[in-house]
Image (tube, helix red, strand yellow):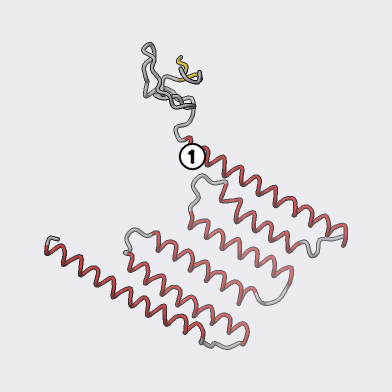
Amino acid sequence: MSYCVNCGVELAASERRCPLCGVEVINPREPFDENGERPFPNDIEKVRHRLVRVTAARVFSLLLAIPLVSILLVDLISDGALTWSLIPTAAIVYAFLAVVLPCLFKRPIVWLFMLLGVAETVLFLFVLNVILGGDWLWLFALPITLLTGAAVIGGYLMLRSRRASLTLKIVVLLLMIAVSLIILQMLIEIHLHGAIRFDWSVYAAIPCGMLSLVALIIGRLVRKSESFRKKMFF
């Protein structure tokens, strides 16, 4: 067994340097053994990040639990039943699922948690609809939530795609924005006026279409320029 000549910490044969102060380990009687058992994990940084995430999740859970218990107690004491406290309770549970839950995973898959976020939002809106009543959920809030979630997840996956070129990514994102705005106005008009009408969504969709066309032209010119350079060897 070796000890660091600088700080005195006990060292294993699998250590080239002291893990505490970084001083090189030199012990002729116990040479370095690369296959030796390490006294701590190899991925210290990953373990530290994991501890930070878990600690943050616990702290945030405690911060959410305090107002949750307070709200429920005040409602029970003042009204003798759970009435208005159900709405902030649903909001606190929604915040817990959206913020705390991803912190508990080692490698959260972004698009999967986006999908879970859409499901959590739908569940939260359903709870509000049960508490408040009304006909705003199924034909208005739910389609808008699903449309927004699909657009965000689709845009993220498109940006993360390695096969698609930058030009294709820009064109697809602009067209997604245009189509989403048109569908959004359609849902709003049906809910408010009972009829389909397009005005502001078209004004926003036309520039998106024009920009996508410009992006296609620029991308084509860039590809031609690169092809010309290869042919001319410069």
Q: In the picture shown, does residue 40 fall above or below 65? A: above
Q: Left or right: where does residue 9 sit relative to residue 133?
A: left
Most foreground residue, 120 or 31: 31
SS for dot 1: helix
- At horizontal 67% and vertical 49% (from top left) the residue drawn is 61
In this orientation, which residue lies closer to the viewer: 60 or 128?
60
Q: Quadrant of residue 217?
A: bottom left
Q: Residue at x 33, y 78 (%)?
A: 213
Specify the farthest residue to the front.
6
Which residue is situated farthest in the top direction here?
A: 29
Binning the other alpha carbons within 10 Å of mark 1 as few (below 14), some (14 to 19) or many (20 upward) gives few
- Identify the residue at image location x=56%, y=39%: 51
Q: Is residue 205 left or right of residue 73?
A: left
Rendering quarter of residue 208: bottom left
In the foreground, 120 or 225: 225
Percent coordinates x, y for residue 194 in the rendering: 61, 87
Q: Is residue 112 above or below residue 183?
A: above
Q: Is residue 97 left or right of residue 68?
A: left
Is 40 located above or below residue 147 in the figure?
A: above
Farthest residue toward the left? Answer: 232
Q: How many marks?
A: 1
Q: Residue at x 70, y 47 (%)?
A: 62
Task: Pick the quarter of the image with the C terminus.
Answer: bottom left
Q: Is residue 68 rendered to the left or right of residue 57?
A: right
List x then y, in percent, for residue 172.
Answer: 38, 71
Q: Position of residue 166 (x, y in %)?
A: 33, 65
Task: Provide the residue designation for mark 1.
Answer: 46
Amino acid type, callout 1? Lys
